[in-house]
Amino acid sequence: MEEKTIEMITKLVMEAMNQPKNEEQGFIVPIGVSARHVHLTQADVETLFGSGYELTKKKELMGGQFASNEVVTIVGLKLRAMENVRILGPVRKASQVEISATDAIKLGIKTPIRESGDTKGSAPIAIVGPKGVVYLQEGCIIAKRHIHMSPEDAVKAGVQNGDTVSVKVENERGTTFNHVQIRVDKSFTLEMHIDTDEANAAKISTGDTVVIIK
Amino acid sequence: MEEKTIEMITKLVMEAMNQPKNEEQGFIVPIGVSARHVHLTQADVETLFGSGYELTKKKELMGGQFASNEVVTIVGLKLRAMENVRILGPVRKASQVEISATDAIKLGIKTPIRESGDTKGSAPIAIVGPKGVVYLQEGCIIAKRHIHMSPEDAVKAGVQNGDTVSVKVENERGTTFNHVQIRVDKSFTLEMHIDTDEANAAKISTGDTVVIIK
């Protein structure tokens, strides 16, 4: 066997040996399932609930967010409605509605998969509250699956802000989510955010764990 | 380098080279998305729609099955109802209701993931028709994802009846379904059956294609 061939083969083998051998060796991430919800500006809160109204806290969530006691009805272009959609606080700089693909089909609206905040050209939606109505010309999205983590966790996981990874769910159904975006910030608690379609298709719930496999 | 080492390395490389290099080389399978539906015995058809009643065909499906014009309302243990659930024909030896995990949550019932026909110990469900009601003590399942194929396709795909494989969806969301069961029968048309949760979580529809990756 030629020296060159042996070199090439050795290089291939070394590369192969640098791959992780199995998923159990991956970085473990807890799951947080997001049901459909709304983020609002303070101005929109007041339009929907009355002048001077402030959201009230029902349950603390990750990263200083909270589920509010307040809910709204959302209505899509085909005039189909969904009731009791929870508002998440605190108020933001822009209002946004996050639904699942199943919800989009039920509402009969074409909704893009986007990162939170990236609502340009997304679906129009009406938000109805007890004191008024807000019409968003754009603002309805399906949230893109992502993982929040601290810089320390990013080092441990061997990833960087903006990376995309695959994440494996090892259970009865057995699912791998690819194209999962990594978001690193020192305020973030380690959690993978998926919507209810993804949770139900993979048979996982908030608090279950998944493993980063690449 | 010792002869033995070279032999070992060569063997490893040969094994590595026998793996498919990328998913594009895998066996391609079209997707069929199953919305919630009901299979009925002739006796149950007659209980629900009247003595002597026969299901009428709305649309041909794969393998001699059809979507009937007839729909029912299903009601779970918590008395929550879902209307307009389609019946698939022809009639079977046992009645069975197939729903998604999202449906199970909405109905508030605990529903196992099962192969079609394997309803022992599955969820109880009431089926309401225009002329009567059927109560299944067991019979409500979430269908386990699977691929139907002919013996010829099985040879081409390099799989056998009862094998489980992984199937990759390469699109914007990017999902891999693991634990997918292969079912081989000469009457089967090549198709992977998934439910609406799986379709929406992976952003695929009937007619889209996926690739068997192992």
Image (spheres, coloured by chain):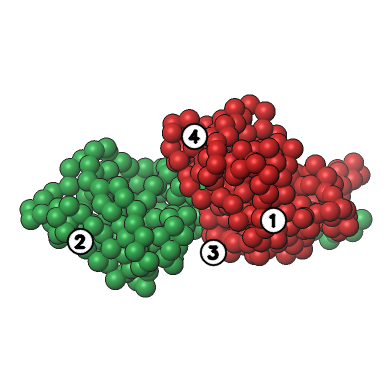
Chain colours: A red, B green
Pointer 4 and pointer 2: residues touching (CB < 8 Å)? no
Q: Nearer the viewer, residue A153 or B31?
A: A153
Q: Chain of mark 4?
A: A
Residue mark closest to the camera, 1 vs 3: 1
Instruction: Give the spatial CA distance, label 1 vs label 3.
Output: 32 Å
Residue mark closest to the camera, 2 vs 1: 1
Which residue matches tag 3? A172
Residue mark closest to the camera, 4 vs 3: 4
Which residue matches tag 4? A76
* Pointer 4 or 3: first along the chain: 4
Residue A89 position within the rendered picture, expressed as x and y whole percent measured from the top left: 69, 50
Q: Chain of mark 1?
A: A
Which residue matches tag 1? A66
| Figure check: B30 above or below B80 | above
Residue mark closest to the camera, 2 vs 3: 2
B118 with respect to A105 (left or right) = left
* Pointer 1 or 3: first along the chain: 1
Q: Residue furthest bottom?
A: B121
Q: Nearer the viewer, residue B60 or B23?
A: B60
Q: Are marks 4 and 1 on the same chain?
A: yes
Q: Chain of mark 2?
A: B
Residue B41 position within the rendered picture, expressed as x and y whole percent measured from the top left: 20, 59
Local secondary structure at mark 3: loop
Circle 1: residue type? Phe
Q: Are marks 2 and 3 on the same chain?
A: no
Q: Residue furthest left?
A: B52
* Pointer 4 or 1: first along the chain: 1
B67 with respect to B24 (left or right) = left
